[in-house]
């Protein structure tokens, strides 16, 4: 388990990183350190929440995606579009225009992910109603939260609902539908337009299932720019407008805050923002069941409307989707057409289950408790030397993190600038030695500022 | 290993502080999650009891590889009839405390349920002493 490699969509571009510590400070799992003047992400700690991507002032954090041209490897090219993608566009752009432009860009089919909700919602409700384990049931919708629970709240992994999210349902449906129409499964390319890094990872390296039916992932901001430019520049009179099944009102807002909890069985709570989620989970761990049946937890503020790969303002996106849902609710009374996905209801329900989500704690100091106790004692002793100002000058997010790194032999006490200064004054350390250590953390560049050398 | 925490009676804002600290420590020591939950739930109940009923108290946590021992001692009104207080739903909490969502009368029984050994000694008018032992099987 310990040696396992974890795939992450979030990468640091070392050519652009200036080692400014912003990302290190916001990382909710303290996964980032600065070494040689560059941010380094610890693979076992990162949950791909994207907070580092959001805050980076020089765009040195990137989110890996597939090359767009990969779609042309397939005769059938399905764009799996989440409703928040549509919600990004200003009011004057119609859904038809967006669909049409997606076809223009090369997709042969456009499918909104949340059609999967028509099957999921019922199963979701029954799952909680029939659940016999310890409550609350926690939604598996947000992959960053699932990973957060695995690493930081290992005791709560058993609470995670074992049902696949709408994107998986949409992919299973499309794969099956086209296969039934006579295509080889290899001919069907299913591309998910992701609003965040965590969903990229969920598709490429899923937790609780062996593989995903999705063939590739395209970042939402990339496609938004492509589509919006297309719409702006080429307003044509004749274009293909694909036939589309209208999305139901509940489905449209499913990925927004309270989208799930509003229809969940029993008493439920919706929490968005990863720090809010952490605060609540800490509470949940110390109390006997707080009499809540279901928790909808989303890493981003305003849920997927606030995904790190979205372009539009999250509040406006959310408002537009609520308006769209309102309109859908009204028109629903008129049209009673059955969603084609329901033709595959039993087939999809048969594949809806997820495997148990395993815990993988990053908290433990050692597997062996006696050894862990020794290390904890050392951490405690080290903290007496450290200034507890959490300045980050050692390249670690806090004094406590440095102390732990030292005990785990990943850092040295001399990395602390306060300790260094004291040792120098007491002639236990030469100026050259401290300089060397500083350069190891910050790289040489930070010490060769031209104007300083010219003084 | 030994840790000590102080509790101030009447301060619900900080109720739970000691239990979250202890939870963090037990996680770092790689104690199994189910055991952590039991210890922490029992400790949280004890902590809230002191906050709700006593003037002040302290918590001593002693961790050995084979067991965790938690001692909670308070200066407060004490418990007149411990057997009665152990009954689920029995509570002497004031309406004010109940309004805050505490005082459902589950405290002591939850503590018993979530520990391997529970000893309560009390003297009316002086205070209460609680010993919670949880064995760690690796």
Image (cartoon, rainbow, N blue to C red):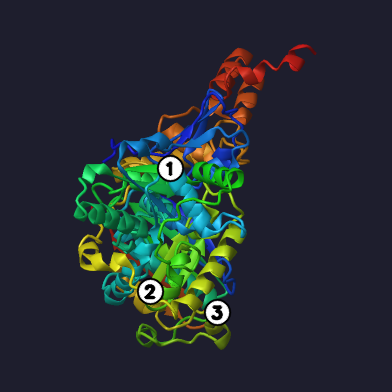
Give how far apart the Cα atoms at labels 1 and 3 are: 48 Å
Judging by the rendered image, the residue that carries numbered circle 2 is: A293
Can marks 1 and 3 be said to lie on one chain?
no
Query: Judging from the image, what secondary structure is the residue with disc 2 in?
Result: loop
Using a 10 Å C-alpha cutoff, classify the residue at mark 3 as few (fewer than 14 neighbours), some (14 to 19) or many (20 or more): few
Disc number lying in front (1 or 3): 1
Residue in the foreground of this view, choosing between A7 and B63: A7
Examine the rendered structure and indicate whether residue A137 appears above or below residue A428.
below
x and y percentages locating residue B108 in the rendered image: 38, 77
Q: Is residue A89 left or right of residue B27?
A: right
x and y percentages locating residue B116 in the rendered image: 28, 67
Judging by the rendered image, the residue that carries numbered circle 3 is: B100
Residue in the foreground of this view, choosing between B15 and A374: B15
Disc number lying in front (2 or 3): 2
Query: Judging from the image, what secondary structure is the residue with disc 1 in?
Result: strand
Give how far apart the Cα atoms at labels 2 and 3 are: 21 Å
Give how far apart the Cα atoms at labels 2 and 1 are: 35 Å
Judging by the rendered image, the residue that carries numbered circle 1 is: A218
Query: Judging from the image, what secondary structure is the residue with disc 3 in?
Result: loop
Examine the rendered structure and indicate whether residue A369 appears above or below residue B122.
above
Q: Quadrant of the N terminus of chain A?
A: top left
Using a 10 Å C-alpha cutoff, classify the residue at mark 2 as few (fewer than 14 neighbours), some (14 to 19) or many (20 or more): many
Which label's residue is closer to the chain start, 2 or 1? 1
Examine the rendered structure and indicate whether residue A38 appears above or below residue A316.
above
Can residue A429 be spotted in the picture? no
Q: Is residue A166 left or right of residue A417?
A: left
Q: Residue under mark 3: which chain is it in?
A: B
Disc number lying in front (2 or 1): 1
Q: Residue under mark 2: which chain is it in?
A: A
The residue lying at 46 percent from left, 65 percent from top is: A252
């Amino acid at each position: 388990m310990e040696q396992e490699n974890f795939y992450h969509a979030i990468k640091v571009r070392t050519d652009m990183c200036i080692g400014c510590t912003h990302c290190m400070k916001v990382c909710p799992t303290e996964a980032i350190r600065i070494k040689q003047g560059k941010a380094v992400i610890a693979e076992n700690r990162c949950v791909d929440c994207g907070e580092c991507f959001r805050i980076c002032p020089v765009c040195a954090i990137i989110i890996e995606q597939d090359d767009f041209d990969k779609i042309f490897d397939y005769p059938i090219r399905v764009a799996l579009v989440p409703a928040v993608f549509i919600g990004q566009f200003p009011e004057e752009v119609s859904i038809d225009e967006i669909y049409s432009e997606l076809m223009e860009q090369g997709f042969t089919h456009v499918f909104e992910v949340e059609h999967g909700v028509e099957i999921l919602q019922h199963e979701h409700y029954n799952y909680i109603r029939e659940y016999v384990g310890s409550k609350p049931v926690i939604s598996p919708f947000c992959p960053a939260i699932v990973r957060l629970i695995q690493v930081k709240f290992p005791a709560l992994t058993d609470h995670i609902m074992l049902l696949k999210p709408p994107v998986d349902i949409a992919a299973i449906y499309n794969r099956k539908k086209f296969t039934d129409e006579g295509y080889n499964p290899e001919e069907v390319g299913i591309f998910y337009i992701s609003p965040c890094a965590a969903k990229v990872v969920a598709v490429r390296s899923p937790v609780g299932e062996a593989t995903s039916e999705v063939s590739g992932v395209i970042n939402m901001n990339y496609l938004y720019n492509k589509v919006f430019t297309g719409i702006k520049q080429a307003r044509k009179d004749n274009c293909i407008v694909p036939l589309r099944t209208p999305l139901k009102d509940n489905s449209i807002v499913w990925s927004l805050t309270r989208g799930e909890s509003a229809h969940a069985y029993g008493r439920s709570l919706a929490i968005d923002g990863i720090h809010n989620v952490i605060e609540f989970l800490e509470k949940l761990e110390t109390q006997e069941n707080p009499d809540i049946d279901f928790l909808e937890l989303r890493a981003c503020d305003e849920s997927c409307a606030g995904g790190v790969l979205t372009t539009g303002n999250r509040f406006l996106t959310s408002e537009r989707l609520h308006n769209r849902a309102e309109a859908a609710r009204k028109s629903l009374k008129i049209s009673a057409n059955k969603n084609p996905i329901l033709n595959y209801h039993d087939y999809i329900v048969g594949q809806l289950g997820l495997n148990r989500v395993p815990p993988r704690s990053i908290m433990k100091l050692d597997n062996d408790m006696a050894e862990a106790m020794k290390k904890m004692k050392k951490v405690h002793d080290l903290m007496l030397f450290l200034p507890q100002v959490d300045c980050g000058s050692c390249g670690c997010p806090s004094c406590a993190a440095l102390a732990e790194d030292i005990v785990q032999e990943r850092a040295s006490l001399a990395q602390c600038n306060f300790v260094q200064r004291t040792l120098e004054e007491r002639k236990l350390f030469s100026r050259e030695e401290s300089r060397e250590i500083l350069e190891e953390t910050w790289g040489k560049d930070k010490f060769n500022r031209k104007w300083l050398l010219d003084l | 290993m030994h840790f000590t925490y102080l509790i101030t009676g009447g301060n619900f804002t900080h109720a739970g502080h000691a239990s979250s600290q202890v939870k963090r420590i037990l996680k770092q020591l790689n104690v199994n999650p189910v055991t952590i939950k039991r210890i922490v739930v029992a400790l949280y109940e004890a902590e809230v009891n002191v906050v709700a009923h006593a003037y002040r108290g302290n918590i001593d946590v002693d961790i050995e590889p084979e067991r965790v021992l938690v001692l909670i001692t308070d200066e407060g009104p004490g418990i007149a009839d411990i057997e009665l207080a152990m009954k689920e739903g029995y509570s002497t909490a004031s309406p004010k405390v109940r309004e805050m969502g505490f005082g459902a009368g589950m405290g002591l029984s939850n503590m018993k349920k979530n520990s391997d050994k529970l000893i309560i000694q009390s003297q009316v008018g002086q205070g209460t002493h609680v010993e919670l032992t949880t064995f760690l099987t690796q």
